[in-house]
Amino acid sequence: MIVQSLDPIAMIGGGGVEDELWHAIRPHAQDVVAADCGAGTALARGLMPHAVIGDMDSLRETDRAALNPDSIHCIAEQETTDFEKCLMSVRAPLILGVGFGGPRLDHRLANFNTLARYPLQRCILLDGADLAFLAPPSLRLDLPVGMRFSVFPMGAVEAVSEGLHWPLAGLSLAPDGRVGTSNRVTAPVYLGVTAPKLLVILPREALDQVVAALREQRDTWSAL
């Protein structure tokens, strides 16, 4: 394990991070881990990454020279993305990932796939107007009435819900079958999930509530 922390970690990819998004995550995570050229984004904001992890195929030499050499961890294999290399190398109570979207749809899909394959990690990915995370076995969120609440299955999964306009109970969800996008909040939300296969996708404005809920939630997939 490259990084172990008792506090949340900000994880920065090479896709660029807008100022508004950066300011949104900073109150929740002070230490920074960068994925490859995400180190340049951190350095440009005056932050020295605790670790830089990836295959280093896009880290600029000027950024490399500004880093502590001991913070650079090259994982040369090409079977995993830089996001996955980071996720499998960090242990923290919560990870907030930014800069992992960008314009490429294939990158976003790969990142969602990675979230589902590392269910022991609690990681929120933020990009543009939305955030996404893998639902724990149970979750309670106090969100504004009318807020969009989407779930998307990364595998076969079932769920029960309270506080959503369209209840999820009794539905068999699957990526090639029924999904659960564009639901909306009607009351405090409860979500119970049968397997670590369900993404929750919310507007970025829900970040503070999601961070609080995931940090307070003790029910995890670790016993599976």
Image: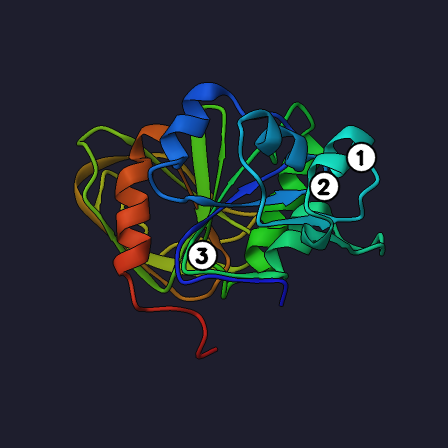
Per the rendering, the mark at residue 122 is: 3
The nearer-to-camera label among 3 and 1 is: 1
Tell me if label 3 and label 2 are in contact, CB under 8 Å: no
User: Can residue 105 be seen in the rendering of this structure?
Assistant: yes
Q: In this view, does 202 lie above or below 218?
A: above
Label 3 – label 2 distance at C-alpha: 21 Å
In depth, the one of 206 and 2 nearer the eye is 2
- Report, in whole angstroms, how far the alpha carbon at label 3 lies from the one at label 1: 27 Å
Q: Which badge, 2 or 1, is on the more N-terminal residue?
A: 2
Locate the N terminus and report the quarter of the image it occupies: bottom right
Q: Is residue 23 left or right of residue 102?
A: left
Q: How crowded is mark 2: few (under 14 residues within 10 Å), some or many (20 or more)?
A: many
Mark 2: which secondary structure? loop
Q: Do the residues labelled 2 and 1 touch (CB within 8 Å)?
A: yes
**Mark 2 to mark 1: distance in Å?**
6 Å
The location of residue 209, given as percent across then percent down, is: 26, 42
Q: Which of 125 and 192 is in front in this view?
A: 125
Residue found farthest to the top: 19
Residue toward you, 36 or 197? 36
Q: Is residue 221 above or below residue 180?
A: below
Q: Which of 135 and 27 is in front in this view?
A: 27
Residue at the (39%, 36%) spot, across then down: 26
Q: Which of marks 3 and 2 is nearer the N terminus?
A: 2
Q: Where is residue 189 in the image (x, y as percent from the top left)?
A: 21, 47
Mark 1, residue position? 58
Evaluate whether residue 162 shows in this view.
Answer: no
Q: What element carries label 1?
A: loop
**Residue identified by numbered label 2:** 36
Q: Residue at x 84, y 52 (%)?
A: 78
